Structures are given as C-alpha cells and as structure tokens.
Amino acid sequence: MEIKLFINGQFKDSSDKIIKTSFDPSNGAEVAKYHVPSVKDIEEAVQAANNAFYNPEWKNMSQDARADLLLKISEKIKERAKEIVDVEVRDSGSTLRKAKADVHNTSAFFKVMSKVARELKLSVKDEAASRAGFSINSREFAPIGVCAQIIPWNFPLVMAGWKIGPILATGCTTVLKSAEETPASAAILAEIIRDAGVPAGVVNIITGGADVGRALISHPLVKKVAFTGSTQVGKEILKNTAGGVLNATMELGGKSANIVLNDADLSIAVDGALYAFLYHSGQACDSGTRLLVQEGIYPEFMEKFLSRIKDVKVAPTTDPNAGYGPVVSEKQMKTILGFIEKTKAEDGKLLFGGNRKTDGEFAKGFFIEPTAFEITPKHTIFQEEIFGPVVGITKFKTEEEAVLLANNSKYGLAGAVWSKDADKAHKIASQLEAGTVWINEYHLLNPGMPFGGFKESGIGREMGSEGIMSYLEVRHVWESDCNEREKKVWLDAIF
Ligand code: NAD
C-alpha cells in the first residue's frame, strides 16, 4: 500500500520525496509506504484548508447538506469495512475483533454526527436575557476556521473519525496528522471523504512525526488545535499555541482507577477488571490500570482474577480468538518492559506475567504477557501511565480510602466502581476527579456524551454537545427592541 498526502482533494507525492515505511507489529512485515510532507506541503495543506473555509460552496452549505455528507461517509465506511479492518489489524496491532468494532463504531459515529449536524441551531434567541421593549439577545454560532488535528496510534480510525466528524458538522476545515506508526486507515478515510463529495480542501490528511506536528500547529492560519496523545506532548503543544492564542482541546493520558467494592458481583467484576486493563494490549487512554480492591473480598477476588487471567489469549492479530495482540512498536515494548523492571526493583509484588513473549509465532513481534503487580501509591506505576498490559493492584479498607487513592493522581481521565448497591456506587462516582466514570461497566462510550479528562488528562471534551461546541465560536448579537430616541438609555451618556 502506498499512502500519499491528501491535500485539496488530491493524493500527492511528498515534494521532498520523503517516503517512510510502517510495519506490522505482529511480525515486522511491511504494511505501507507513506509520504511525509515537507514544510512546503504543510503550507499547501493549510492554504487549501483556509481557501476551503472561505469557499462559498462550503461556507454557505446548509446544515442538511453537511448532514447528508456525514451520512454518506458513514455508509461508505460500512461498504469498505473488510478492507479497513484488514489494514487496521496489520498497521496497528489491533485484533480482528477490535478492528471490526472500531470500524463499526466509526461508521456509527459519523451517523450520529449527521443527526447532530442536521439539528444544530446556529442562531438561538435567549428569551431569558432578552427584555421586551429593550433588547432581543441571541447567540450565533460560527465555525472556528482551519483546525490542526493530531492523533495517536492506538485507535487510528476511531480517532480520525472523532476529529473529522465535528469538522464536517460545523463547517470548519482541517489538516489532520495521523501518527507515523499507523497511517493506513486514515488514508482510506481520505478516499471515502473524497468519494462522498466533501469539497476539496475541507479535509486534508497527512502523516508525520513531531516535526510535522510542530510545523502544522504553528501555522498562522490555524485557529484551533485538537490534539490526542500523551500529556507530555500536550504540554509542549499548549506552549507552542500560546503565541497565536489558539483555541485548543487536549485529550491526554490517564491512570484510571477501577474500584471493586466488597459487595461487587465477582462473576462480572473479575472479567471487567481484566477487560479494563488488557483491551488492545492496555494501549487505551482510559485503561483501568490502577485496580483498587476492598479488603473484604480481596482474597476471593484475587484467586478468581489470577485464575481467569490465564484464559486471556495473547496471539498474533490474525487469530480470531486473540484477546489481545502485540503492542504497537519496539519502542513502546521497551517502555513497557522498563516499567515492569522498575516495579520489580521497587519491590512491587509480581503476581502474574512480567515478560515479553518470544517463542514460536511471537518471535518477530512485540508481545507482552498480561502482567499484574500488587502495589502501593509509592510505586512509580501507581502514578505513571504505562500504556501496556500491566495493572497495579492496591487493597483498601473503606470507601473514603478508595476515593482518596483514586484521586491520588495527576491524571483524571476515567474510572469505574463495581458494586451491587447503585446508590453507594453513585456516591463514590460523584467524588472521582475523572471525566468518565462507569458503574459496573468499562471502556464503553456513547457518542452523545462527552469524553475527556480532569487535571492533566486534558482540556475540553470530544463527543456530546460539548465536543461540537468546541469547534464553534459564539457571537452575541444584540438587537435593539427600542427604536424611540427618547427611550435610549445611553442618550445622555456623552452629550
Ligand atoms: P504522543 O503524544 O507521543 O503522540 C501523539 C501524536 O502527536 C502523534 O501523532 C505524534 O506524531 C504527535 N506529536 C508528537 N510530538 C509532537 C509535537 N511536539 N508537536 C506536535 N505533534 C506531536 O502519543 P502516542 O504515544 O502516539 O499515544 C499515546 C498517548 O495518547 C497516551 O498518553 C494516551 O493516553 C494518549 N491518548 C489519549 C486519548 C484521550 O482521548 N484522552 C486517546 C488516545 C490516546
């Protein structure tokens, strides 16, 4: 597969002829050759997005027409599902099951965005603020303009969808940069967007590393940065956007607490805890990597947990029964193994796993065993995001202690509570400093509801009405409801 730059509705070569390769993390096989944009190409992409923003065909397009485009994209994703699943599995190390779910969810997300676009009211009179005979006050919503959108490698198609959906629903335009590890599915999405009839330049898609990202966000025509990635890079981007006073939404890292209370239904909670930290090899931002278990059920929970963890099948992604596959790259694998060694050195008690898998079919890939440690807040992995199949388990006595432990983190992306008592679970949920809290559930998201983080897990939200609003500027329009000269309150102000 050859992936060119998608600029102004056309697929183009890198003007500097920089071509790199992406690899299958299961076996090291080549997946794609992708073109990396030069500074000149980035300039062209941003100019294309800016021209498209002011192009009357896009600027004046009705919300119904935008909604129709979004629906077409949703349908075309479904039509090309098999092809997308195939590249996503090889490019990102997603299992077949995950890739199928990602394609389904992305298609569904564009469908939801279509409904949102159709129902979006861009001018709303505020009855409460208006005063008869004095003022008619309304809010008008206007698209922010050219956006620079930067996504990570863990959910390549889903992340591209979450970024591009609101662009099309609101009338913004974008240059989206996919991650170098996983350029493939966004390239197919580019074809789908073109084939759906989205005007040229509205969506531009390029792939590259930090340098490309830096050049993109510092372009003076960019009005908003939407970033998903690590907190460390998010902080750098925030510094770099300060000069342009750019609007920015940040979806960053996490170290989410998964709390199991004494009265939890263990027939669900044990599997839920495994799913929470092992889904996609632990490479999900909202992973439940701090497992907090109440002391009354600790022995029983742990016995079941350590018995059930053996049933999770680590396998190459083409195996339809793989529970999870490789981690995305050798670099990521080394980071994870480094955290495992550090935890051992800090006397964390290793309960399961802890090794790379290298025998037979695993030899050429980056596979790591499911790994569980018993830890306390003093261990590094209680605080630092690993982004791998590693959980730290901590025992607690009281619900108050569980809340303190859960909030003892610089992150605040997500969390969960497992209990048969809904009132008790809600009471705990309402005290968690986290953007999403599940009760007897994990990882599931609803496109109609916001997703994002407290504290260093981010700024702003994606999805829900909050996600849409983050692509719109608000304009207060004050119309006088008083056209009699002598009744104007300001008449004597300066005369
Ligand atoms: P990363 O921060 O290293 O890279 C993310 C993206 O930013 C990539 O496209 C990369 O090329 C680009 N980039 C890197 N340096 C840059 C710079 N200085 N300027 C501009 N762009 C730059 O993250 P990653 O390793 O790709 O992804 C894993 C991280 O993403 C984890 O921390 C995870 O928690 C986070 N994540 C968060 C969410 C969320 O919604 N909160 C979702 C998925 C992943």
Image: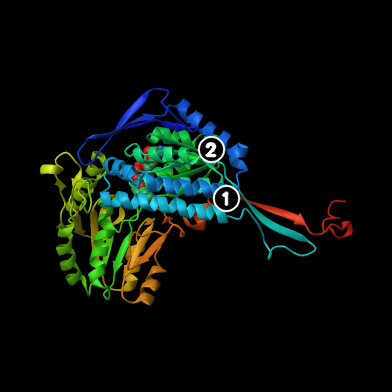
Residue 93 in the image: state x and y as whole percent.
26, 44
> Horizontally, is 464 left or right of 429 in the view?
right
Q: Is residue 231 visible?
A: no
Residue positioned 37% across, 55% down in the render? 410
Q: Which residue is mark 2?
A: 199
User: Is the residue 417 above or below the residue 81 in the image?
Assistant: below
Q: Residue furthest front?
A: 79
Viewer-proximal residue among 392 and 90: 90
Residue positioned 71% across, 58% down in the render? 137
Label 2 neighbour load within 10 Å: few <14, some 14-19, many 20+: some
Give SS at disc 2: loop
Residue 395 in the image: state x and y as whole percent.
24, 67
Quarter in which the N terminus is drawn: top left
User: Is the residue 290 above or below the residue 200 in the image?
Assistant: below
- Amino acid type, callout 1: Asp
User: Is the residue 72 above or below the residue 1 in the image?
Assistant: below
Label count reads 2
Residue 299 in the image: state x and y as whole percent.
17, 71
Residue 151 in the image: state x and y as whole percent.
40, 43
Q: Is mark 2 within 8 Å of ligand 1?
A: no
> Residues at badges 1 and 2 in contact (C-beta under 8 Å)?
no
Label 1 neighbour load within 10 Å: few <14, some 14-19, many 20+: some
Q: Is residue 238 visible?
A: yes
- Amino acid type, callout 2: Pro
Q: Which residue is mark 1?
A: 64
